[in-house]
Amino acid sequence: MLNTMKKHGLTLALYAALSTALTSGVYLLTKNIIDEQAAQQQKALFDDLLPPSIYDNTPQSECYIVTNEVLGNTTPHRLYLASKDGIPVAAIAEATAPDGYSGAIRLIVAADFNGTVLGVRTLEHHETPGLGDKIELRISDWITRFSGQVVNGEQDPRWAVRKDGGEFDQFTGATITPRAVVKAVKQTALYIQQHHVQFNALPHCEMKK
């Protein structure tokens, strides 16, 4: 009986070791492919957000970490600098709209240093299908309305949904979601405009190996 138990125990241990080795091998073989695909997707996103004529660097390599609550909360958000002839001209920043109808909405916002929004996309949300999910580009082009809009200070009255006297459409039956996104985009553009001279002092992102 004891010998049988030892035999089964050794068999299970060998099986576990082989499974672990196989899993590790597959991970190592696919990691570079997965990382490359993620980098390509990020580049495609940045190409959508930034007009190609305004920059000539690779923003992905100019990545900084922001923990300022103005971006929605103190969770670390990534910020990428776009430069032209070595001079920073714009930034792409991750942001959070904490007051969505169904929880936090993750965004990415591109803006230049004059307060002009260059592009916005929704990265993640849990808003109601058919109502609040119109912030997603594959559902609606609403999120593209921010492109070219300028933020003229904290009290700019245009930066609100029409129900609140602003210039941005709300959704039929869903005002909370667009209101939260408008506020987050405005705050992010202001942050980029007002703090861009300090970006080089921010901690750098940890680069993947």
Image (spheres, rainbow, N blue to C red):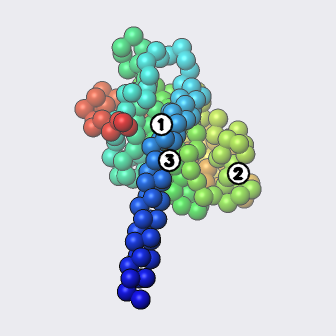
**SS type, badge 3:** helix
Residue tagged by mark 3? 26
Neighbor class of circle 3 (other Cα within 10 Å; few <14, some 14-19, many 20+) is: few
Q: Residue furthest left?
A: 201
Q: Is residue 78 visible?
A: yes
Could you tell whether 6 is left or right of 147 in the image?
Answer: left
* Spatial separation of the CA atoms under disc 2 and disc 1: 42 Å
The amino acid marked with disc number 1 is Asn
- Where 42 falls versus 50 (above or below)? below
Query: Which mark, by number, is residue 139?
Result: none
Residue 46 visible in the picture: no
Instruction: Locate residue 69, reporting x and y percent.
Output: 36, 49
Which residue is rendered at x = 44% and y = 77% of the image?
A: 8
Q: Quadrant of the N terminus?
A: bottom left
Given this view, does label 2 or label 1 mark the residue nearer the observer?
1
Residue 172 location in percent, x, y? Answer: 74, 54
Residue marked by disc 2: 171
